[in-house]
Amino acid sequence: MSVSDGLIYLMEEWLPPSVAIQKSWLEAGERFIRYEDLLESDLEILEPVLLEECALPISRQKLHDAVTKNRFERLTRGRERGQENVKSHERKGVAGDWQNYFDDQVKDAFKARFGDLLIATKYERNNEW
């Protein structure tokens, strides 16, 4: 299967449950935390959400330790974000890399299925991307 066909297959078979979760958060008025924002400000975002809003019963230090131990650089044993390893689950650690894999066919298929969600989650302003 080509990369394009594989991505379209995943859109049809694997992505719908994740889309349903995101839609449920939007419909419930829940905060939407974006991966891109976590890459830059993980602790600043997660501390108030998990410790204050969710009242997670752990210390700030334990949360800090858990977050820092799960950053890309730690999970990859020192590989910096942007250094790709196609055989690793932690492939590249950067936002927006999907653009390197979406040809026109994949882009059109994604827009048709999930374009409205991209707009609702403020990843895009309209379907002209």
Image: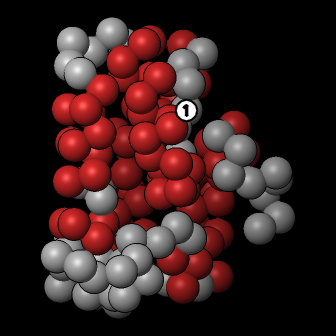
Mark 1 Cα within 10 Å, few/some/many (few <14, many 20+)? few
Please state, as top left, top right, bottom left or bottom right, where the N terminus lies in the image: bottom left
- Residue pictured at 42% horizontal, 13% vertical: 52
Q: Quadrant of residue 85?
A: bottom left
Locate residue 6, reporting x and y percent: 34, 77
> Residue 56: percent from the left, percent from the top?
27, 15
The residue pinned by badge 1 equals 32
Q: In this orientation, which residue lies closer to the viewer: 88 or 81? A: 81
Instruction: Please name the colour scheme applied to the rendered image.
Output: secondary structure
Secondary structure category for the residue under label 1: loop
Q: Quadrant of the C terminus?
A: bottom right
Residue 58 image offset from top left, x and y in percent: 20, 19
Foreground: 109 or 31?
Answer: 31
Q: Is residue 56 left or right of residue 5?
A: left
Q: Reply above or below: 85 against 33.
A: below
Residue at image point 71% right, 44% down: 122
Q: Amino acid at mark 1?
A: Phe
Residue 18: percent from left, percent from top: 37, 42
